[in-house]
Amino acid sequence: MRSTPNPRINPRAPRFRRRTLAAASAAAVVAALVALPGGVAQAASPDIVISQVYGGGGNSGAPYVNDFVELYNRGTAPVSVTGWTVQYASAAGGSWSRTTLSGTIAPGRYFLVQEAAGAGTGAALPTPDATGTIAMSATSGKVALVTNGTALTCTSGCASQSGVKDLVGYGSGASSAEGTPTGNLSNSTAALRTGGGATDTDNNAADFAITAPVPRNSSSTGTGGNPAGTRIHDIQGAARTSPLAGSAVSAVPGVVTAVGPNGFWYQDPQPDNDPGTSEGIYVYTAGAPSVAVGDSVTVNATVTQYRPGGTGGTTNLSITELTAPTVTVVAHNVALPAATVVGQGGRVPPSAVISSVTSGDVEAAGNFQPATDGLDFWRSLEGMRVEIDNAAVVGPTNKYGELVVVPPGSTTRTNRGGILLQANDGNPERVVLGKALAPTPTANVGDTLTGATVGVLDYAFGNFTLQVTATPAVTSGGIAPETTAAPTAGQLAAATFNVENLAPSDPQSKFDGLAAGIVTNLRSPDLVALEEIQDNSGATDDGTVSATQTLAKLTAAITAAGGPSYSYREIDPVDGQDGGQPGGNIRQVFLFRTDRGLSFTDRPGAGSTTADSVVNAGGTPQLAYSPGRIDPTNSAFNSSRKPLAGEFRWNGKPVFVIANHFNSKGGDQPLFGRYQPPAHPSETQRHAQATAVKGFTDQILAVDPNASVIVLGDLNDFEFSQTADILTAGGSLTDLPRTLPLPERYTYVYEGNSQVLDHILISGALAATSYSYDIVHINSEFSTQLSDHDPQVVRIPLP
């Protein structure tokens, strides 16, 4: 199993394989009409309606500091609201507060009424069209639009009171409503009338959706009264989801920019002045579209938020799309809208913050900030043509044809052209290049995509993806696999290498390549801790646990490559108990040579469930079993590899080595996902595993504080992680990746982020020597890999 920091959360499938959406029938709309008390149906307003209600302003977690009421003209003519009032009463009350209005609302326009501010923080509203001081309830209440200045006195039946133009009862406790009240609101949600404010069946529960507030003032346009006036930027909105989600839109114009097997992208050639609103969108046709790139079209459709990945993709962001479309081609061979340049000379993405949202679901939060938050920056370009000039490759082309790039000039680059993941920098400037529309090139980290890389911006598998519309040209950065220095006669060379599910069924070329890596690039270390050695039947789940054939094939390949004769020690796991690829039974193995002074101290008797221990032999620590497993029945190691402990001797002196492969990051939420900050539930098990290993090393050092101890392997966590902190607590172990300069700290490249997952830690006596440590980059940066991890080696002078 690949040890991935943010694994794919849904199966690899074409971006365009979609579910079928059914349009709402007219009968369903009719059924939504609800009789008011007394059996009299309130007629739907032909023009001005209350389109949004929000009462959580300034409360804890509120996206905006003020409460507000929003109006909308769904009619065909301007309407004067001078002398009208917006009125509010508590859910069960009959005492109404008023805000007096003035001005005219044009058809298809909103009118924002700002009310009282709360005591907390939040963003300022857009410039209001009217201002009042009403403090509204965040959860439930009653709001009325009244065509005069007389205060209402009703507690129920308010919709039929004289002068009441529209009424919204929000929250289940509201004593009066049109039809049934809406659901309860909160500090972070508002009641939004669907259809962009145009839907009015006189049933509050049916007409309003409970979602994040999207305040709109008179400069905003909607669909009512002037359906042809709706533009793509109105649909996308300056938000993470569409303000028009669920509504029907008509005659939305644009030019087709890309065509896929089940839909097409199109873009408005007449953008607005707001960089936060995307001008492009995907139209899902459910089959081959009948349009071509360069067609000028208008689209009638339903606005939908589609979450890729289905039930397995709940942590993905949703994408605003047009579904069930009717497409009219206005003209052919129209010039495409200019691509938005990202990077120098264009829109520069944020360099450190992916999202400043701290409340969980970003789609229910406000504070849309494309200037400062990477997630919002890319969302503001969703569906648009995007261009990156001379893009820098920071993630090599993978088996899915994807590679990851950043605009030139991005910060915190590695020495070889990657971009470094850090504790407070997830590198929001990264974007994946996808091959859904045109082939992507084969490239390595450090390469440059010369000239313009152009595509349409999509989102899938937890990442924003630029689906290229032409294959970019590649200029090589010239990186080559590294070779470390050979150990001197007095140096013990210890290495760790994750060989990624090595099994006898793998092609001989993989064995030969790994052997060359060990012999040539690692210079035949005295000791190599191997991770992900599979059993003799590989991924076939037949009960086999022995790995003798796997190891015989590897050691033979090493000898054939000119290396020394290596011996090995390991303990077969219980079938199916150590995680990894089903049937593979991966385990750690000590691979060692004995011709330079290293030998293995065998103390047999340990099985797969036998716990090793430390024995005090007259002031000298010894392992009860060698090899042995550390605390194998501890729940910390459920469905995960058990640490392998071995006692070696270097020129007669004991050296204790612990080989590890901690719990993978499977199940963690993606960096560009729906929930922010992302949850990392896999950390809990790694912390417990680190605690168990630290406890074992402490036992050795308690007997002899100057003991030679090496802890190494794939810890599946970063050098700045709590996992590493647990292992290094008290200073008894030094984590060698932490000793390197930042541009050298990486053993793995995932989604373009260069990062540390593999570690070597050494005890204080070894750290006090003039050791030499090297991460040997032979895999992670290259499109052709024998493993997804880079090995590393430490050379310790032990006379």
Image: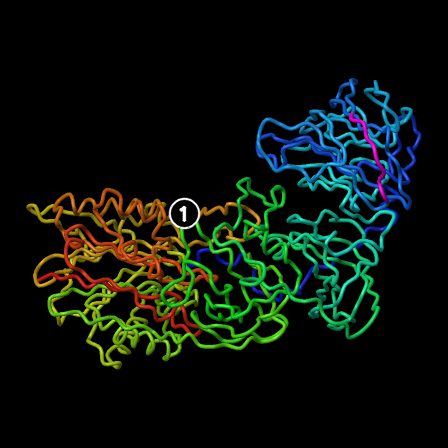
Q: Is residue 63 left or right of residue 722?
A: right
Q: Residues within 10 Å of mark 1 (few under 14, many from 20)?
A: many
Point out residue 660 in the picture as x, y percentages from the top left corner: 30, 56
* Residue range of the region highlighted in magenta in the rendering: 99-106
Say which quarter of the image contains residue 652.
Answer: bottom left
Point out residue 714 in the picture as x, y percentages from the top left corner: 33, 58
Point out residue 320 in the picture as x, y percentages from the top left corner: 69, 54
Q: Is residue 113 left or right of residue 187?
A: right
Residue 607 in view of the camera: no
Q: Is residue 190 left or right of residue 432?
A: right
Q: Residue 773, relative to residue 476: is it above or below?
A: above
Q: Residue at x 17, y 50 (%)?
A: 764
Q: Does residue 793 belong to the magenta stretch?
A: no
Q: Is residue 736 left or right of residue 412?
A: left
Q: Residue at x 73, y 42 (%)?
A: 216
Nearer to me, 750 or 281? 281
Three-letter code for the amino acid on which mark 1 is drawn? Glu
Nearer to me, 785 or 618? 785
Q: Which residue is mark 1?
A: 683
Quarter occupied by the N terminus? bottom left
Quarter occupied by the C terminus? bottom left
Q: Residue 358, relative to residue 517: is it above or below?
A: above
Say which quarter of the image contains residue 16.
Answer: bottom right
